């Protein structure tokens, strides 16, 4: 019924495996090279070169890119695999962020709970739980929210669903903005946000605000895990059911696939990734700030999924890295260069709207399968010739 | 004729479906005896597809009930009815186009498999074994419907005939007791239709599945059916062996007669 | 398995009981909230309600655009709210900046009417071009594609708005006076009267166009069945363009009225109001003209009461209240108040 809008990695198992291996090696190598560069080479470089890298490829934006890979892959499960348009994904990011804010800071300073956490020196008050544990709690918390949001709404037609998710994407951040006084309780510290967030600990080593190359490595590992999860789920029982629902909901139900349950599971997995990303992001920027969780973020993450080719794991990864970099660094730097050279005063970051808007429209009009479909198309070509040879 | 005396595996009693003020199906009783091949025919708009959708749980009847193996299944969700063993194909093919033939078949094994998010992500031995078995069964079914060479091809790239066959393989993956075929020979030439008759018999004899056919092609219906039921304007107007239906005046008037005059125009 | 089947029936009954009970409880809560406020300050209550209906009239105008487009091509036009925003920005820059019509003089009233017509034409033209450039090519594509395109369009329009008025909200003096009158303790702003004076004829015109004209009949035919309409000699493309023009014109009119009554415009105006208006359209039953108007007025009223009444959640929860309503509607009555449920064809 539905046609070529959506691309996927549905390649024959043996060919997909070699293809995946190449990409996986590429991803791992890139991460290691970047880490090694900043850990060992960067400090011994001359000042101007250091400045260049600090301006164009700062570690914060690299870490952010990895977190966006994680989240874009989470949304990819909902939009790319199951074909459910979620326009409020930022809600899960916010929920995960506040889990970190609550459990990894001095915010609830009337209590002092420390469970493997690493509070700032001299500020033991508050709840300080170990980062890795909070990741799991955050993921589970948002998964539950995914089900709460999904259960009543997943029955709806696809376009209505888009709108209701958008509604949740507005209500939940609004709750956090207004949350400094919920029946007399301060739950979120309102627009001030919660800061600072505890360090990340790995085997007794604490990584704080300045250990950005280590944090980058940790976020990359999380993104890598999400890649593995996405690939494996895609090739399993659930992945097939999601794709079937995306292709033809009615036929899927007639083949014994329970629609609500299967959709809910995609929602829960996607939400979990959003929550984990939220916790990670809080540790990256050392705080949670309600006003950062706006509608534009939901759309930027959607654009990442669309750019890479919905359903295509590696494409979405590349899309997330590129768009995240443009959003956090590229546009500002490019603007500085242009304004500096021409003596103009153009506000380049404001072009974000145009870039992401045009990107969505153009991709849908001219390249619905995303930018990285070569591998799959090549495989299809390969397969058909194979069969002709065999006959 | 012996199979017609078997106990019905699927039994629809006094089914009526009303849309708004329109009576699409009017008090129709119908059953499929175990191991039989029966057909449902009638002119366009006679209510065949609506009736079909009642059997598969897509529509709830306004009144009446459907019994499967003696149990009432009316009101159950369609996916539960499918998982319970009532499989169908679609009049206008509804495959999952961007999935391979193998994956299409494996989707229908969903209800017989168990793997969840955790076991799939960790590739636990139980999940691996389950997947391997499912792949093997899928290949067996593709071979059974004679498209064993298309395993890794996208469904949308298959030829029309192969797509029809893949739909049957996919339905068989539910391990059904009853198979409902909705105009399976639509778009086939007489030669292909004749082969299809053999194919339907093979499904019944080799897999022991009872079959209900909705068909337009009279030669197919007359050749393969052990019993034919005729619907016209939502009502059952005749039921009997092909020979009886051929000579039934009411049927000729309502159906054959009409197509006869249409053909002579 | 017989027992499971019976079990299913029982569960369905329990479900309907739960649904009815929760609707009853929500209704009871709303009525007691309204009742308490009404008794405490009847004049305030009416003042607030009128202000709510004032906004509701604007929502109705915007909601019409959503409902018309959805009715004909089943697309939630996410860019529609931003089209309204551009209508408001257009009016502000033409009437207040270019023509310096910032006081309530007869000559300025003339300019206001002229700007109204121009704003309607501007938004109609813009909406038609958006359909022509983007949505038309995706008419046969799977549903996600036009939806995502509409979201992208919304961003592009916001960009235009951002570069037109800047990133901060901008205030303007208006032709419509900001003063108000007092009737038995009830405050009614003159601008509210103006809104109704302009909205009611527009709505009547709209109903007339859709129900009585050739184009309107073509619209209804295309909405029912594109292929059949084409066979009957209806120019489908032209009819869809006409629908977008009609919806755009209503958004343009709403834009001018918003600018003239509120006196402030900002580039992200369309997002909020667009969503509220869409909620209105859904509430009334999407695709249904009268439903959009009814929904708009109801949502305006509810929002006005929530924001303005002494006992209430207050303005900062305004969005949440509207979305809460949207979600409840979707869960309990997705077809809306005046809509009909539809089933999928097999």
Image: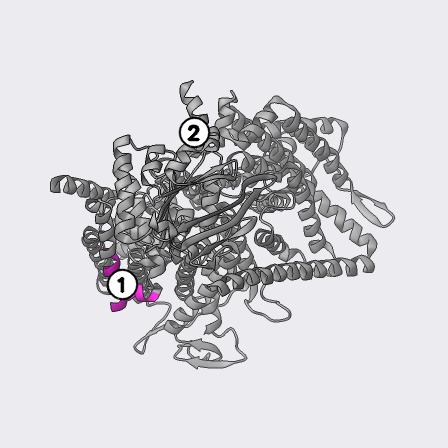
Task: Identify whether A288 is placed above or below C129.
Answer: below
Q: Which of the 4 image quarters holds residue A71?
A: bottom left
How packed mark 1 is, by other alpha carbons closer than 10 Å (few <14, some 14-19, many 20 or more), is some
Instruction: Please state which of residues C225 and A178 is positioned toward the viewer in this rendering.
Output: C225
Q: Residue at x 67, y 60 (%)?
A: C26
Q: Residue furthest right?
A: C184
Q: Is B60 on the left or on the right of B149, as rendered? A: right
- Specify the segment rendered in magenta: B118-135
Residue C40, horizontal then vertical, whole percent: 82, 60
Q: Residue at x 54, y 79 (%)?
A: A110
Residue C176, horizontal then vertical, whole percent: 73, 36
Q: Which mark is residue B130?
A: 1
Residue B95, horizontal then vertical, whole percent: 34, 44
Q: Which mark is residue A382?
A: none
Q: Nearer the viewer, mark 2 or mark 1?
A: 2
Q: Which of the 4 image quarters holds residue B264?
A: top left
């Amino acid at each position: 019924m539905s046609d070529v809008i959506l691309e996927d990695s549905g390649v024959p198992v043996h060919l997909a495996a070699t293809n995946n291996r190449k990409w996986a090696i590429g991803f791992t190598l890139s991460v290691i090279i970047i880490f090694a560069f900043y850990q060992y080479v960067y400090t011994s470089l001359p000042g101007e070169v250091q400045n260049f890298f600090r301006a164009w490829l700062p570690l914060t934006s690299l870490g952010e890119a990895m977190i966006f890979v994680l989240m874009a892959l989470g949304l990819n499960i909902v939009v790319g695999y199951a074909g459910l348009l979620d326009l409020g994904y930022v809600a899960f990011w916010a929920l995960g962020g506040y889990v970190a804010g609550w459990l990894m800071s001095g915010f609830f300073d009337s209590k002092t709970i420390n469970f493997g956490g690493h509070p700032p020196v001299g500020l033991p008050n508050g709840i300080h739980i170990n980062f890795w544990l909070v990741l799991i709690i955050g993921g589970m918390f948002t998964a539950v929210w995914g089900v709460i949001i999904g259960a009543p709404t997943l029955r709806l037609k696809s376009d209505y669903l888009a709108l209701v998710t958008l509604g949740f994407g507005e209500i939940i951040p609004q709750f956090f903005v207004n949350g400094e006084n919920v029946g007399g309780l301060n739950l979120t510290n309102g627009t001030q946000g919660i800061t600072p967030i505890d360090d990340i600990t790995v085997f007794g080593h604490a990584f704080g605000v300045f250990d950005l190359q280590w944090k980058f490595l940790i976020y990359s590992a999380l993104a890598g895990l999400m890649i593995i999860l996405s690939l494996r789920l895609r090739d399993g029982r659930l992945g097939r059911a999601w794709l079937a629902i995306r292709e033809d909901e009615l036929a899927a139900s007639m083949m014994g696939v329970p629609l609500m349950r299967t959709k809910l599971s995609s929602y829960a997995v996607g939400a979990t990734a959003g929550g984990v990303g939220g916790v990670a992001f809080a540790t990256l920027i050392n705080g949670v700030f309600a006003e950062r969780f706006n509608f534009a973020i939901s759309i930027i993450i959607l654009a990442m999924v669309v750019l890479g080719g919905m359903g295509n794991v590696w494409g979405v990864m590349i899309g997330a890295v590129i768009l995240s970099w443009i959003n956090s660094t590229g546009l500002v730097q490019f603007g500085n260069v242009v304004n500096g050279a021409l003596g103009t005063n153009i506000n380049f970051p404001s072009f974000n709207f145009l870039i992401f808007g045009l990107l969505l429209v153009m991709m849908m009009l001219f390249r619905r399968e995303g930018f990285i479909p070569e591998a799959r198309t090549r495989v299809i070509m390969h397969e058909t010739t194979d069969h002709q040879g065999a006959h | 004729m012996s199979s017609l005396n078997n106990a019905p595996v699927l039994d629809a009693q006094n089914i009526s479906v009303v849309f708004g003020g329109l009576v699409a199906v009017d008090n129709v009783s119908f059953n499929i005896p175990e191991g039989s091949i029966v057909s449902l025919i009638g002119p366009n708009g006679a209510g065949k597809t609506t009736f079909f959708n009642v059997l598969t749980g897509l529509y709830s009847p306004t009144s009446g009930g459907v019994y499967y193996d003696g149990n009432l299944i009316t009101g159950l969700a369609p996916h539960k009815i499918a998982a319970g063993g009532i499989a169908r194909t679609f009049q206008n093919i509804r495959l999952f186009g961007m999935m391979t033939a193998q994956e299409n078949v494996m989707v229908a094994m969903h209800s017989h498999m168990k793997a969840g998010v955790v076991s799939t992500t960790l590739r636990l031995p139980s999940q691996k074994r389950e997947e391997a078995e499912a792949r093997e069964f899928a290949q067996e079914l593709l071979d059974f419907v004679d498209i064993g060479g298309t395993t890794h091809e996208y469904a949308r790239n298959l030829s029309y005939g192969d797509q029809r066959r893949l739909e049957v393989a996919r339905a068989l993956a539910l391990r059904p007791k009853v198979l409902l075929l909705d105009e399976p020979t639509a778009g086939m030439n007489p030669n292909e239709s004749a082969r299809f008759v053999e194919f339907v018999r093979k499904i019944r004899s080799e897999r022991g599945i009872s079959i209900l056919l909705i068909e337009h092609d009279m030669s197919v219906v007359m050749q393969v059916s052990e019993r034919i039921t005729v619907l016209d304007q939502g009502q059952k107007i005749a039921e009997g062996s092909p020979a009886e239906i051929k000579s039934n005046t009411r049927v000729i008037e309502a159906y054959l007669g009409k197509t006869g005059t249409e053909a002579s125009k | 398995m017989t027992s499971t089947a019976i079990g299913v029936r029982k569960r369905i009954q329990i479900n309907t009981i739960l649904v009815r009970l929760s609707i009853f409880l929500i209704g009871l809560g709303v009525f007691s909230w309204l009742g308490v406020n009404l008794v405490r300050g009847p004049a305030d209550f009416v003042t607030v309600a009128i202000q709510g209906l004032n906004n509701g009239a604007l929502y109705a105008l915007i909601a019409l655009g959503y409902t018309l487009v959805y009715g004909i091509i089943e697309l939630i036009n996410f860019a529609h709210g931003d089209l309204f925003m551009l209508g408001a920005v257009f009016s502000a820059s033409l009437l207040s900046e270019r023509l310096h019509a910032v006081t309530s003089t007869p000559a300025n009233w003339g300019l206001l009417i002229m700007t109204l017509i121009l704003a309607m034409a501007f938004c109609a033209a813009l909406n038609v071009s958006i359909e022509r450039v983007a949505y038309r090519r995706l008419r046969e594509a799977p549903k996600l594609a036009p939806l995502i395109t509409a979201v992208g369009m919304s961003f592009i329009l916001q960009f235009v708005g951002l570069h037109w008025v800047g990133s901060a909200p901008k205030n303007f003096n208006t032709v419509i006076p900001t003063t108000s009158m007092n009737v038995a303790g009830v405050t009614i702003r003159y601008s509210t009267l103006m809104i109704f004076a302009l909205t009611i004829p527009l709505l009547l015109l709209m109903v007339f166009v859709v129900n009585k004209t050739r184009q309107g009949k073509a619209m209804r035919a295309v909405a029912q069945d594109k292929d059949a309409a084409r066979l009957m000699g209806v120019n489908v493309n032209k009819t869809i363009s006409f629908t977008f023009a009609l919806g755009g014109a209503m958004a343009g009119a709403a834009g001018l009225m918003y600018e003239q009554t509120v006196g402030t415009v900002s580039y992200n105006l369309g997002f909020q109001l667009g969503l509220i208006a869409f909620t209105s359209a859904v509430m009334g039953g999407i695709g249904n003209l009268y439903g959009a108007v009814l929904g708009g007025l109801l949502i305006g009223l509810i929002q006005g009461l929530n924001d303005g009444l002494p006992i209430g959640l207050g303005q900062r929860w305004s969005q949440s209240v509207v979305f809460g309503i949207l979600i409840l509607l979707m869960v309990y009555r997705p077809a809306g108040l005046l809509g009909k449920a539809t089933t999928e064809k097999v």
